[in-house]
Amino acid sequence: MSLPKTLAEDVARNLVMVARLIDEDPEQAYAYSRIALRLASRVAAVREAAGFAAYSSQRYAEALAEFRASRRMTGSVELWPVMADCERGLGRPERAMAMAGEPEVQKLDKAGQVEMRLVAAGARRDMGQLDAAIVTLQSPELASNAIHPWTPRLRYAYADVLLEAGREDEAREWFGKAMEADKDGATDASDRLAELDGVEFVDALDDDDDHGDAPLDADADADGDAADGDAETGDGGVDGSTKA
């Protein structure tokens, strides 16, 4: 609202494209964010969007700078967890852990506090402190039967670190709980659980193609007098490279 109408519309178009592309094409989203930033660098929402676009494309130093700028403009602490995760991305897990102990965390809403807990546990894992990471994730939110938007990710992270620590039975249980809570498929908990249970997925079409090739080749080898033209026609009729 602080921008002239035409400029505001141009900025808005670019921000819409950032939102549309950030999951599927982070690099393209980043390109749109740079245009919006060039047009309106003094708008906090633009700095925040630029930060998320940089974060999604793993430009962590740039993302951190944009998040800090947005925070200075708004005074909000809601970006604190993702700022800490940028420190992890920059190979500084100890800084992320320090941020987890700052007063800003107490000002976060419940979702933000859970996110901060996930980041802190990730930092512990980065430092090879698996037991500490497990303890960090053990919380009332993890134990609760209530389902919230962050529940699948919290349970998944807990299962993942349990598995890394060699506690496979517990990991299987928590991957199952994550799958139960994950109605939108935000995690690959079902695949991880299947992997632990030894379930192997086979491409049925490829299987059929393989079986189809064998008789043709076998017959051709057995019949030394098969016509060349017939053999070529038989081989060409099976496309072994076809994928489902």
Image (cartoon, helix red, strand yellow):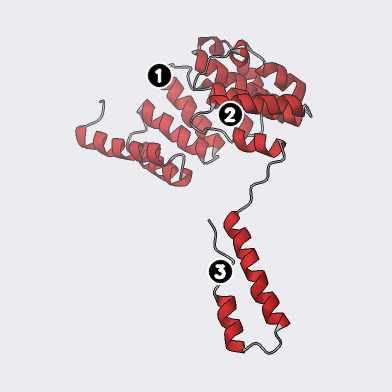
SS for tag 1?
helix
Q: Nearer the viewer, residue 144 or 3?
A: 144
Asked if residue 17 lies left or right of residue 169, the reply is left
Q: Residue at x 56, y 18 (%)?
A: 114
Choose the circle earlier in sequence order: 1 or 2.
Answer: 1
Q: Is residue 84 visible?
A: no
**x, y percent for residue 55:** 52, 35
Q: Residue at x 71, y 87 (%)?
A: 224
SS for tag 2?
helix
Q: Residue at x 68, y 90 (%)?
A: 225
Q: Which residue is mark 2?
A: 179
Q: CA distance from mark 3 to mark 1?
A: 60 Å
Identify the amino acid type marked 3.
Asp
How many other residues sit within 10 Å of disc 3, few (<14), some (14-19) or many (≥20)? few
Q: Nearer the viewer, mark 1 or mark 2?
A: 2
Identify the amino acid type marked 2.
Met
Vertical arrangement, residue 188 with respect to residue 78, above or below: below
Asked if residue 53 lies left or right of residue 222, the reply is left
Q: Is residue 26 visible?
A: yes
Q: Nearer the viewer, mark 3 or mark 1?
A: 3
**x, y percent for residue 171:** 71, 27
Q: Which residue is mark 3?
A: 239
Q: Residue at x 66, y 20 (%)?
A: 97
| Image quadrant in which you'd find residue 142 | top right
| Image quadrant in which you'd find residue 37 | top left
Identify the amino acid type marked 1.
Thr
Asked if residue 13 lies left or right of residue 171, the reply is left
**x, y percent for residue 233:** 55, 81
